[in-house]
Image (cartoon, grey):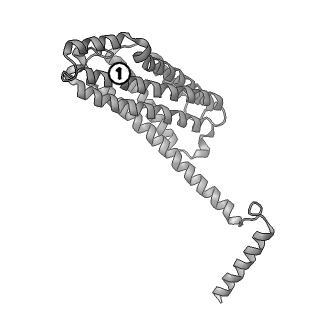
């Protein structure tokens, strides 16, 4: 009896499908199921973005705290050669984490600023991602060059020194991607902070603190600058925390 009833239902469904296109006939439960799964999937994707942002920021902060080079922005032959493997490893990790951070930061702010501040979020996201990727490319390219030329099996120390000196002064092909990337990333984060402020999706103190930390990067130098940038990474982790605990619909601003 159950089998006959099931077959009868199948025949009825086939008749309905022939009479009505699939676009106009669907069980009523399908729409609600779709909404449920979309909400669950949206929440899951939001949490993945938040977790990736937090992990990337934590990795960048760790590299800043434990950096193997002695003097910030000083990469002479004498600076690199003794710790060449440690510098390569640190910058490989840092470059990957920084590019990932820029991408997930842009996505995070876009998830928060879906109403108010959406236009600022879109502009800031594009600039931040472009800057983060360029900075990562330039930083790792220079460190890879430094690792290679400080290998005395490849070049004598005198020749390696000349190559590094030339790389430090040659702006167009070596330093330009990193410098341009840093400026674009800085500008992008300021715009993203403005988008967060306008969206009102997070406490107002957070975008204000982000702007302050960004500006302070141009005030301090060397080890103090490291700690300022670590503070900026902590703010991204806080932002990721706000995103992680919120439903996607609550982050619309």
Q: In what element is the residue under mark 1? A: helix
Screen quadrant of the N terminus: bottom right
Screen quadrant of the C terminus: top right
On screen, residue 27 versus residue 88, left or right, reads: right
> Furthest residue to the bottom?
1
Whether residue 47 is visible, yes or no, is yes
On screen, residue 30 versus residue 78, left or right, reads: right
On screen, residue 148 versus residue 125, left or right, reads: left
On screen, residue 240 versus residue 141, left or right, reads: right
Q: Is residue 187 above or below residue 196?
A: above
Where residue 167 sits: x, y (%)? 34, 14
Where residue 102 sits: x, y (%)? 48, 31
> Mark 1 highlights which residue?
142
Viewer-side residue, 246 vs 187? 187
Identify the residue at horizontal 77%, vertical 72% (top origin): 16
> Furthest residue to the front?
154
Identify the residue at horizontal 60%, vertical 43% (top origin): 250
Where residue 227 sits: x, y (%)? 35, 22
Viewer-side residue, 177 vs 105? 177
- Give the quadrant of residue 151: top left
Where residue 174 sits: x, y (%)? 40, 17
Q: Is residue 215 above or below residue 210?
A: above
């Amino acid at each position: 009896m159950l089998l006959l009833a099931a077959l009868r239902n199948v025949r009825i469904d086939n008749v309905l499908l022939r009479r009505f296109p699939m676009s106009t006939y669907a069980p009523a439960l399908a729409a609600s199921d779709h909404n449920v799964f979309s909400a669950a999937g949206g929440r899951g994707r939001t949490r993945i973005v938040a977790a990736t942002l937090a992990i990337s920021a934590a990795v960048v902060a760790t590299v800043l705290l434990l950096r193997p080079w002695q003097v910030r922005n000083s990469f002479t032959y004498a600076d690199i050669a003794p710790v060449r493997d440690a510098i390569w490893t640190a910058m490989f990790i840092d470059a990957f984490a920084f590019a990932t951070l820029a991408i997930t930061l842009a996505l995070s702010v876009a998830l928060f600023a879906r109403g108010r501040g959406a236009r600022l979020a879109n502009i800031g996201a594009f600039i931040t991602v472009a800057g983060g990727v360029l900075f990562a490319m330039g930083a790792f390219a220079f460190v890879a060059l430094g690792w290679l030329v400080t290998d005395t099996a490849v070049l004598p120390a005198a020749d390696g020194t000349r190559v590094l000196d030339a790389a430090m002064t040659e702006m167009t092909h070596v330093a330009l991607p990193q410098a341009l990337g840093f400026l674009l990333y800085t500008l992008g984060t300021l715009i993203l902070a403005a988008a967060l402020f306008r969206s009102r999706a997070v406490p107002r103190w957070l975008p204000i603190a982000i702007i302050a930390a960004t500006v302070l990067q141009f005030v301090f130098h060397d080890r103090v600058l490291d700690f300022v940038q670590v503070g900026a990474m902590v703010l991204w982790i806080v932002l990721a925390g706000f995103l992680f605990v919120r439903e996607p619909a609550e982050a619309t601003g």
